[in-house]
Amino acid sequence: MMFDPMYWVVIGVGMLLSLWASAKTKGAFTHYSQFTTRAGMTGAQVARRILEDNAVFDVKIEHVPGDLTDHYDPRTKTLRLSDSVYASRSMSAFGVAAHEVGHALQHAQGYAPLGFRSMWVPVANFGGGISMMVILGALLAGGAATAAGTTMGWLGLALFGTTTLFTLVTLPVEFDASKRALATLSLGGYATAEELHGAKKVLDAAALTYVAAFVTSLLTLVYWAYALGLMGNRREE
């Protein structure tokens, strides 16, 4: 495996995609953090207002340390905003805060993909945690060249596939949250057209990180299927 050029191609593509998406996100966030919104509210304030506009009154808003560590926790109905969002009055803060509110609205309205993703988290954690041990065991057993290797190989791919499925389901969840964010900012009159454009740029850049995660996971899954001889690389004894 360590001497397989295809392995390093997959790893390299995954790293480059992740670095590119991260750089785009940080660049867009930093750029639009320089512009204060006309409404003059902080990220935490606009988040609370949007929740109230949608009759959602049971979600807590908390400050969490760090940058771009913002998230919504459906288990405790808590929206956590980072240092650069919670008290900021920038276009970037508005976009990110509204995006996280989008997840809270998904939860309140029973958005199915969010419910599935939340349910799938322990499955993906378990599958991702042991998949490599099973895949390596399958390789040692001979992969598709032996019955044991074939069985273990398919089991390993299924386990790894739980994480790939998680990254796939994450895409509509995140895209929908961003769509809700921009709509609520516009309908509530919290942002001008120019400010909405800036918020959209930030959210579009952030979405690339989720796309990169899915593509990387899918490429890795396909690579292991190939390396095990289960897809176009069947080895003969």
Image: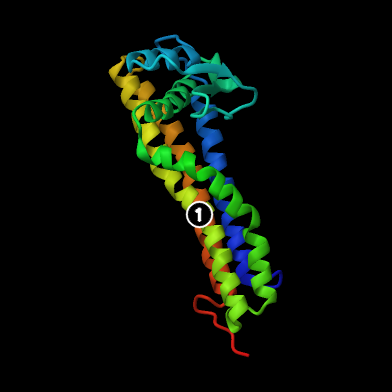
In the image, residue 188 lies at what x, y percent?
Answer: 31, 15
Where does label 1 land, which residue? 164
Q: Is residue 142 above or below residue 1?
A: below
Mark 1 lies on a secondary structure that is helix
* In front of the other: 24 or 68: 68
Q: Give the residue displayed 68% in from the left and 62% down from the top.
A: 133
Residue 21 visible in the displayed image: yes
Left or right: where does residue 208 sit relative to residue 187?
A: right
Q: Give the residue displayed 58% in from the left and 21% down from the top.
A: 84
In the image, residue 6 lies at what x, y percent?
Answer: 60, 70
> In terms of image quadrants, where is residue 141?
bottom right
Left or right: where does residue 233 sit relative to residue 54?
A: right
Q: Residue furthest left?
A: 187
Q: Quadrant of the C terminus?
A: bottom right
> In terms of image quadrants, where is residue 200?
top left
Q: Give the residue displayed 49% in from the left and 48% down from the top.
A: 166
Residue 89 visible in the displayed image: no
In the image, residue 122 lies at what x, y percent?
Answer: 56, 44
Q: Residue furthest top?
A: 40
Q: Is residue 148 above or below residue 130?
A: below
> In terms of image quadrants, where is residue 136?
bottom right
* In front of the other: 166 or 149: 149
Q: Amino acid at mark 1?
A: Thr
Q: Is residue 120 above or below residue 65?
A: below
Q: How many marks?
A: 1
Q: Quadrant of the N terminus?
A: bottom right
In the image, residue 30 lies at what x, y percent?
Answer: 55, 28
* In front of the other: 108 or 44: 108
Colouring convention used in this rendered image of the protein: rainbow
Q: Is residue 152 above or below residue 109?
A: below
Q: Give the residue displayed 64% in from the left and 53% down from the top.
A: 129
Label 1 CA crowd tier, 10 Å (few <14, some 14–19, many 20+): many
